[in-house]
Image: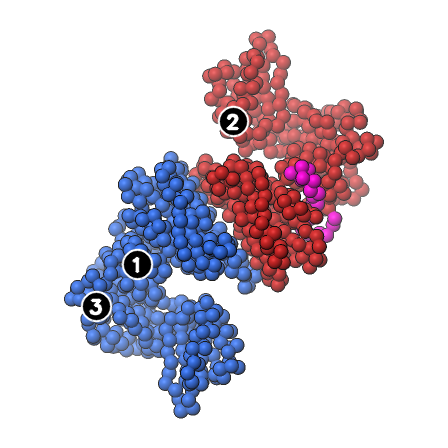
Chain colours: A blue, B red
Amino acid sequence: MALVVQKYGGSSLESADRIKRVAERIVATKKAGNDVVVVCSAMGDTTDELLDLAQQVNPVPPEREMDMLLTAGERISNALVAMAISAHGFEAWSFTGSQAGVVTTGVHGNARIIDVTPSRVTEALDQGYIALVAGFQGVAQDTKDITTLGRGGSDTTAVALAAALNADACEIYSDVDGVYTADPRIVPNARKLDTIPYEEMLELAASGSKILHLRSVEYARRYGVPIRVRSSYSDKPGTTVAGSIEEIPVEQALITGVAHDRSEAKVTVTGVPDHAGAAGRIFRVIADAEIDIDMVLQNVSNTAGRTDITFTLSKANGPKAVAELEKLKGELEFDSVLYDDQVGKVSLVGAGMRSHPGVTATFCEALAKVGVNIEIINTSEIRISVLIRDAQLDDAVRAIHEAFELGGDEEAVVYAGSGR
Amino acid sequence: MALVVQKYGGSSLESADRIKRVAERIVATKKAGNDVVVVCSAMGDTTDELLDLAQQVNPVPPEREMDMLLTAGERISNALVAMAISAHGFEAWSFTGSQAGVVTTGVHGNARIIDVTPSRVTEALDQGYIALVAGFQGVAQDTKDITTLGRGGSDTTAVALAAALNADACEIYSDVDGVYTADPRIVPNARKLDTIPYEEMLELAASGSKILHLRSVEYARRYGVPIRVRSSYSDKPGTTVAGSIEEIPVEQALITGVAHDRSEAKVTVTGVPDHAGAAGRIFRVIADAEIDIDMVLQNVSNTAGRTDITFTLSKANGPKAVAELEKLKGELEFDSVLYDDQVGKVSLVGAGMRSHPGVTATFCEALAKVGVNIEIINTSEIRISVLIRDAQLDDAVRAIHEAFELGGDEEAVVYAGSGR
């Protein structure tokens, strides 16, 4: 008998009917002779509705209470799925993150899982029950306060449980039936991948692919948990995320896909005195504000011995970052802080880059051909990313996808929406 | 410095604006130099919306999951109130029932509080914070599962916390500004009471008065917690529930008020063999189904040595009770089970009854005068209740209120809705 962990995204649970469909799939898995642990996100728009309510009562709601508020969403969806399952004559118990032993750091809104001790989940399984665990949430080790894992946190909950329970499979269900060479909504002939190694999936996730949350892939890689990305609405096998690029023979290494990201903004600190430590001070201030940055660019100093420092970050953190930097102005004596949220990022990912020197050239040529200007370029061993104008993002994705001949013959099936 | 426990009902929290108003009142109490603990019900219709969702996925949802589902409502409202408070520059921490140490029995949907160990609440108060506790919910002592206290459970949470924290005051806020001699929506000149002893409030609550939940008054009486019933929308002193009728000199004892109840249904088991134990079997079956009954009537046996047994219970439990009794038919050989939900109950309450023999007569005369037929009559030392036709309930309330001259001079202010 196998132990299967299944995670269902918010769009797969947005109505009573969809919840019933999900319950049928869970029951089918149980009937097939498996032990089943299910992780559910909040129903469709619940999270946005709660965020809206919070905004109405307090424009800057305290993060501890925000976590208390948002975690109600998963609690609701999990209880409803449990009810839908029992309508089929199967016993199901739902647990909060805390009850399931998801122990985290105390950083509200963006906690990290420290440990998973799912004794109550295994208890339920031992009694033949289907166990449901509220995704996205945990309990802080020190304060015992409720925490949330940040966007996509439910994926991480599922992978962490799969690792702790030593599950045979971890299936992530959403409204897409796998990982594609590009977003099919932008590139109609994008091709579905059957398998993808962890490193490439990490790069895609870090580059804006919404299919799996970055942290969940990191977790899966660390604990060697194979993830299957599948659609809630079909029985297609989906895409398996497993294995390392190190196992791929160089000659077989390929360019895997194109990712894009509209969620970032660009901050430029101009006229920074070009002395040692200036950049350090800037990035320390940002780090102290718990803000992650992505791309970084430092210009060559001008004759006045001053330079511009540019970096990208999530739009959500933009105002906070600007405010923090303004405070630094007196101390660091730079000219000004510029903020630009009309940017987009397009990335090409593939282990094949390591053995094919021409990739960067082809990449830039493809963009030039469609008149796209590159503002920042940033590469890893298996990824090239560039920051461009937001409005040109779709053209850029199509151009690159075509230049590297990533397309398939048939058109991809596209569903709307996406879960958390 | 005083410690004040305040409870706010769902209608006082039904929108972001009302939540802000509640927050202002809480902050004002804190500014006045008090320690404040707040218990909130779920926002307005949240509970009904969740119940509706549950019905859609499973007509008979498992009670454990129902509790998991419904408790999300208080979690949301409490977090939002905490956010609204912090918008005024005051720190507020919200706690789930479990975090606040509300330990209960394991009866899902109708758990009773066994113990309250609010160490995290006192911790918050010691740090100068305002503490919020999700009402209506607790954690089962044995299973550690989430439980709910049943309708009106938030009142009980507030009183239980006030007792455990040895609070100086327990204020229950809703959309009515006190306890009236009758429902002002039915009797326009109903009079607001300044004080009412526990026993009388218990009888009113047991007789259908929605102002305070029966169990919360029982709890307040046992631990000697004075309750102040106030309106969220005014600064009127409201009604104080405290003291015992034993302390009232007989000559000052009065008739206090009229209560009515539309929530009950009537079950009649006909042709029950009139032998010892028959009635016992019937009520055992009902009790084993965790169903509370109210009024009971057993007719004199007919010549065939058979009798009818009639009792009333909450409409919500009607179908369940009928089903349980039908199972008993083979064993007990009665004729049939009749179900009637077109009934209403009207009650007169007052310590003065003990010293005024004519009360029952006046009561029945008043009903006769308006053509109301009495189906069951049931009395306690300080209460008379009768079961009548639902459609005649309003007339009956007005007739009795008038017969005992309970009215005041001014018209009562009436608000819509009522919290849980």
Other residues around mark 2 within 10 Å, as few (<14) / some (14–19) / many (≥20): few
Q: Is residue B150 above or below residue A153?
A: above
Other residues around mark 1 within 10 Å, as few (<14) / some (14–19) / many (≥20): many
The label shown at residue A221 is 1
Q: Which residue is mark 3?
A: A352
Q: Disc 2 sits on a residue from what chain?
A: B
Q: CA distance from mark 3 to mark 2?
A: 70 Å
Disc 3 residue type?
Gly
Q: Is residue A120 above or below residue A139?
A: above
Residue A305 visible, this angle:
yes
**Magenta region includes residue A340:** no
Identify the secondary structure beneath mark 1: helix
Write the start and end of the magenta stretch as one range: B219-237
- The quadrant in which the C terminus of chain A is found is bottom left
Identify the secondary structure beneath mark 3: helix
Disc 2 residue type?
Asp
**Magenta region includes residue B224:** yes
Q: Nearer the viewer, residue A50 or A335?
A: A335
Residue found farthest to the right: B251
Quadrant hosting residue A193 = bottom left
Is disc 3 in contact with disc 1, using a CB cutoff of under 8 Å? no
Identify the secondary structure beneath mark 2: helix
Q: CA distance from mark 1 to mark 2?
A: 53 Å
Q: Which residue is mark 2?
A: B288
> Along the polypeptide, which appears first: circle 3 or circle 1?
1
Measured as percent of width and height from the top left, residue B318 is found at: 54, 29
Are labels 3 and 1 assigned to the same chain? yes
Disc 1 residue type?
Arg
Measured as percent of width and height from the top left, residue A332 is found at: 49, 82
Residue lying at 67% horizontally and 50% vertically, measured from the top left: B4
